[in-house]
Amino acid sequence: MLAGGIDPSGGAGLSVDGAAVRALGLHPAPVCALVTLQDGTRYVDARPVSARLVFGALQMVAERLAVKALKTGALGSAANVRAVVRFARQHRHIALVVDPVVRSTTAGALFDASAVALLQRTLFPLATLVTPNLDEAELLTGLPCRTPDQMHRAAQALLAYGPRAVLLKGGHLDGPQLVDVLALDDGTVRRFTASRLDVPEVRGTGCALASLCAGHIALGASIEDAVQAAAGVLRDAMSRASRVGDGPRVLSF
């Protein structure tokens, strides 16, 4: 199951989440928490969906489908964070992957400060995996995240909020190497490295990676194996990314 925002251009958010999950042979049940007005190059506005509707949709899906994992993206409001927290507490058997999306790639704010603090304090402790990118990790921790060592320290700081694991996504690091840092609550730390693909800018990669992790966890993989498998699927989708109009390319699953 997926809870997040709608990007009308289809290059990020629930559209990409659903495509990623379907690529694993799973059924995506999308719950819209935020409607945005953007097109991949411009951000204009965003409006959260009613928390009552978000919670009701989550409950309805869980009652009808055999949900194994829930991935959250842009929730848009403190009320929606509380709705997801309420749901997660009632369904502890469902693995929770939290992608703390607070800004769009076009620099639009998708969360206010009170919602970000609430996310850390109440949703992170319920999470199986939290998957911030570098900018999000800096915002959440106040620490720099521009080298692998700094990423390690920031991941440990986020782990202190109580999730089972933190995957710090390093796609925005400078240099020819991609580095993701995974920290688990048992003290395990792994760095996943790969050469940077020689492709133009691609949208939705962070959304997709988190959704792929959730999908592999739903299929029974360990957190470490889920992250590794997800990165491989994402890399393939990036290599085949296509242009569907102006702006960045979109993933092809």
Image: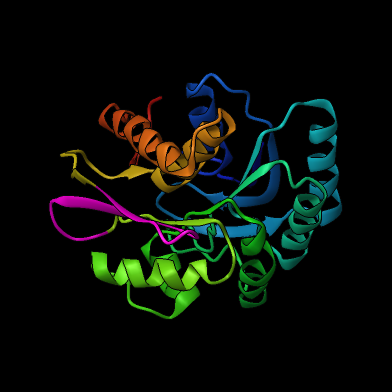
Q: What number of labels is visible?
A: 0
Residue lying furthest left in this view?
A: 176
Name the magenta segment's main secondary structure: strand
Residue 190 is situated, as x and y percent measured from the top left of the image, at 32, 53
Q: Is residue 218 above or below residue 200?
A: above
Task: Check residue 56 for magenta coloring.
Answer: no
Residue situated in front as seen by the camera: 204 or 139: 139
Residue 52 is situated, as x and y percent measured from the top left of the image, at 86, 52
Q: Is residue 137 above or below residue 193?
A: below
**Residue at position x 68%, y 31% in the image:** 29
> Going by the image, does 201 lie left or right of 164?
left
**Residue at position x 85%, y 32% in the image:** 63
Where on the picture, by quarter, is residue 45? bottom right
**Residue at position x 78%, y 42% in the image:** 58
Q: Which residues are magenta?
A: 173-192
**Residue at position x 61%, y 77% in the image:** 113
Where on the picture, by quarter, is residue 123? bottom right
Query: Is residue 153 shown to the viewer in this render?
Result: yes
Where on the picture, by quarter, is residue 2? top right
